Image (cartoon, grey):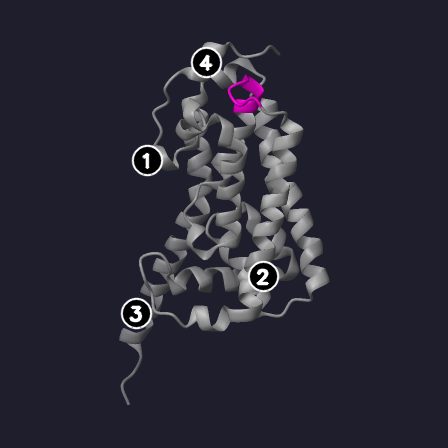
């Protein structure tokens, strides 16, 4: 295991996301270097605490940030980055819980829009009903769902102490865990040589749960339509 060559950390990477949303692009921007930790934390907080942040690439952001710390592209100790990410992830879920506890029902009665769709809430509600309190931890690893589950927990009046416990565990496993995984893998030469492929795989894995849910919803819709057509008419 050896450190990656500095040149590898400056190679342009062709991502599948727009540059402003592609962690492998904006995290390498020298102009943003003094603000990288703050930017990463802002993304994490927005995705987990603000309903409009559901589209942000949390998994790939954390993995890439950890990887770039390992390569020296981000000049911040991994301990500092991990601690800041943990605080942002924890605070984000706390805000989500507060929103759900105080104004959740009113928010969910809003009509669908480009940024807010009732299906996201329904998906998070089903996830919460299926896994109970553990959903606060497990949802961290599911895009979109991780944005809405804390709100659902607030609406469901989950005991606050219980929520905090699950929130701490989830922030550690996801926020710190994914960042450390990127940092560890970033110390291997083959990761640097294949970073394009690895990044695409990360994004693809993040999207898989969404694709599965969409397929299930489409299949359920078709089955409902078929049953309606075959139902006898009185």
Secondary element under disc 4, as helix, strand or loop, is helix
On the image, which quarter does residue 221 sit in? bottom left
The disc label shown at residue 18, or none: 1
The answer to whether the residues at label 4 and label 3 have Cβ atoms under 8 Å apart is no
Query: Dot 1: what SS?
Result: loop
Question: Residue 98's spot in the image, x, y percent?
Answer: 58, 63
Report the residue that reaches farthest toward the bottom.
Answer: 234
- Mark 1 touches mark 3? (CB < 8 Å): no
* Spot occupied by residue 68 in the image (x, y as percentages of width and height): 52, 23
| Secondary structure beneath label 2 | helix
Choose mark 3 or mark 2, whichever is in front. 2
Comparing marks 4 and 3, which lies closer to the viewer?
4
Would residue 175 be counted in the magenta stretch?
A: no
Q: In the depicted view, which residue is nearer to us: 106 or 121?
A: 106
- Among numbered discs 2 and 1, the one appearing first in the sequence: 1
The answer to whether residue 129 shows anywhere in this view is no
Segment tinted magenta in the rendering: 68-75
Q: Which residue is mark 3?
A: 225
Upstream in sequence: badge 1 or badge 3 = 1
């Amino acid at each position: 295991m050896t450190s990656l060559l500095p040149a590898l950390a400056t190679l342009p990477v062709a991502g599948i996301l727009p540059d402003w949303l592609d962690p492998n692009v904006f995290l390498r921007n020298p102009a943003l270097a003094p603000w990288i930790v703050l930017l990463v934390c802002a993304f994490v907080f927005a995705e987990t605490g603000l309903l409009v942040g559901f589209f942000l690439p949390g998994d790939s952001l954390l993995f890439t940030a950890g990887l770039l710390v390992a390569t020296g592209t981000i000049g911040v100790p991994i301990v500092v980055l991990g601690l800041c990410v943990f605080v942002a992830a924890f605070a984000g879920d706390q805000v989500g819980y507060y929103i759900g506890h105080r104004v959740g029902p009113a928010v969910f009665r809003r009509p669908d829009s480009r940024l807010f769709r009732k299906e996201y809430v329904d998906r998070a509600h089903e996830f919460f009903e299926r896994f109970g309190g553990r959903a606060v931890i497990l949802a961290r690893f599911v895009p979109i769902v991780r944005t809405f589950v804390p709100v659902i927990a607030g609406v469901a009046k989950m005991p606050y102490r219980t929520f905090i416990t699950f929130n701490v565990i989830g922030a550690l496993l996801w926020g710190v865990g994914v960042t450390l995984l990127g940092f560890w893998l970033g110390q291997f030469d083959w990761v640097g040589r294949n970073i394009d492929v690895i990044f695409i795989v990360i994004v693809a894995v993040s999207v898989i749960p969404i694709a599965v849910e969409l397929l299930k919803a489409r299949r359920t819709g078709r089955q409902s339509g078929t049953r309606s057509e075959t139902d006898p008419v009185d």
